[in-house]
Amino acid sequence: MLTIDTLNFSYTNKPVLDNISFSLTRGELCGLFGPNGCGKTTLFKCCLKFLTGYTGTIAINGMDIKTIKTREMAKLVAYVPQDHKPPFPYLVKEMVLMGRTPHLNPMSVPKARDMEKAEQALSTLGIAHLRDQPYDLLSGGQRQMVLIARAIAQETRLIFLDEPTSALDFKNQLEIWKTLRAIADQGITILACSHDPNHVAWFCDTTVVLNDNEVAATGSPATVLCQEMMDTIYQGSCQVRDLEDIKMILPKGVTHKQPTPREIMA
Amino acid sequence: MTTTQLINKQTLSTTALFGLLVMTAFLCMQCGACSIPVSAIVKTISAHLFSYPDLDSLERLHNTIVWNIRLPRTLLAVVVGVCLATAGTVFQGCFKNPLVEPYVLGISSGAAFGASLGIVFPSFFLSVQVLAFVFGFMAVAMAYTMARVRGQTPVVTLILAGVITGSIFSAFVGIIKYVAQDTALREIVFWLMGGFYYAGWRDLAILVPIALPCFVIIWLSGWRINVISMGDQEAQSLGINPEATKLLLITLATLMTAAAVSSVGIIAWVGLMMPHATRMITGPDHRIVIPVAGILGAIYLIVCDTLARTLTNAEIPIGIITSILGAPYLFFLIRSKGQRVFGG
């Protein structure tokens, strides 16, 4: 589905991506993971053609993305940006309808069929009741859902999400990840970058760990997210525990907390 | 709601507003130093267009006033209103900012410089109108070139570049005003405040062929403006090339503004206010905002121009009227709708 081969990118002599290679297969939910400044965002931008001037190849369905036109590209890959407010108070249905843009003729407007697709996407995510609400008045979690619905309406086989849960409460974070899981199970490939190793461990099929502008590891979260890897990327600040068959990454110290003097007294 | 219903609703409100525009136009054409009944206006127009009733049966005074003065003047107000309001909508959409107006890229200062050149040096081989058009367009082209870095034109850089070209041309206008003779100076000042004093069929013949195709293309691009207003990266991920689309739209909007400004001078507020007023009626979808903003802009300018020529014995420059009426309206918007209208 997506193949990245020896990708290099640098901003004026400062290397940001160094020999990145990995690939994703159909229906795979992959968590892109790594500390701040490791090059996640730049990798995304290269894959979505927001940045050019990289070396190496990025291929979608075996086609080099350099040869794919913007409109065709948008039929292959959808992008869910981080939550933001648009300058105008568009309605939810209008936002989702924008996902149909690559399927329209350049001077034309969405037709009844496109409206149906948008409605379907809203129902798939269980937010059909928000249809006529202004997007900018929704909560962060709802807005993220709308942006995902837009990507679904775009009908691509590949979806990129930029920190989909960064501004959400715990319940909404889980909601979003479950939704992504369900989408991936329908055969759509998802690459989501995340700052939370637990989310990657709980929900993703595979993970790509970036550290110091390089791929530190790829593979299933169960094997990749080990103590050694956490020590490498977070300099020994957390520890990995197995809770039955689930991995938990915890801050170092919370489990070996010494009883406070007051607790000893009691 | 299905698309058909949506489009029907939109068509309905657009048609209703268009009816309001026609009505306003006729009512305003009645007013003036010589009051003419609507029936006489209709008769005159019908006589000229359909040769019924016979031209000779018309009162000559009415014929002259309606056909040679008020009708072209009203139509010019309509076209200029459409131009400024449409351009304002495009700029606000492309710049993702509801506070920009058509003059943001320095077009008004450029046009002012061109016009002053033409006024002070009447022997120059181009007319005031053409000079204003050329320099207005040139100011925007300069701003765009300055702001373009490695194939990208960031909005903030573009607006700053607009401020720069604007101030350069304003300084040039200052020089010309300083050296100009009294009569020329007076004429420059009047030009800067805008007005339909000399409106005639000739102005329409120049303006319409530029404005109409631009308006049609912009209207057809309404959906793409929605997508562009999401920001460059999102627009690209939705299959629209943001740089090429913005360049096309800004060029068309600039052509419309330059054409309007060159024929009637600098009229403030219409381009800023009409898109806002429209969004309050129709919502933010540019497919409908563009035609409705155009119609509202036309109505606003007809009313303001009628006030300008009837309030006092002398004629008041229309730029003054549009500002005096526009400013309180914007104040009302800020107080009543606050952040919802202005983003943020």
Image (tube, coloured by chain):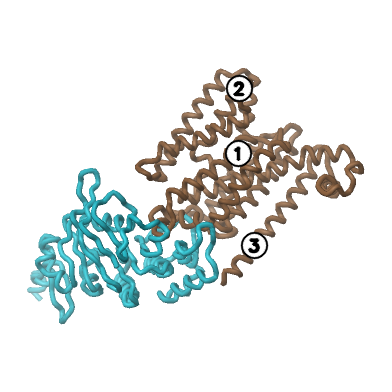
Chain colours: A cyan, B brown
Question: Disc 2 residue type?
Answer: Phe
Asked if A168 appears above or below B142 in the picture, the reply is below
- From the viewer's perspective, is the residue at label 2 or at label 3 nearer? 2
Place of residue B190 in the rendered image (x, y in percent of width and height, measured from the top left): 64, 29
Mark yes or no: residue A139 visible.
Answer: no
Residue occupying image coordinates x 44% and y 41%: B159
Q: CA distance from mark 2 to mark 3?
A: 48 Å
Position of B342 with respect to B34 (left or right) is left
Name the residue beneath numbered marker 1: B259
Question: Disc 3 residue type?
Answer: Thr
Q: Confirm whether circles 1 and 3 share one chain.
A: yes
Asked if B282 appears above or below B69 in the picture, the reply is below
Name the chain letter of the residue that bears numbered label 3: B
Place of residue A222 in the rendered image (x, y in percent of width and height, measured from the top left): 16, 74
Q: Residues within 10 Å of mark 3 (few under 14, many from 20)?
A: few
Of the two numbered discs 2 and 1 on the same chain, state the one appearing first in sequence. 2
Asked if A137 appears above or below A265 in the picture, the reply is above
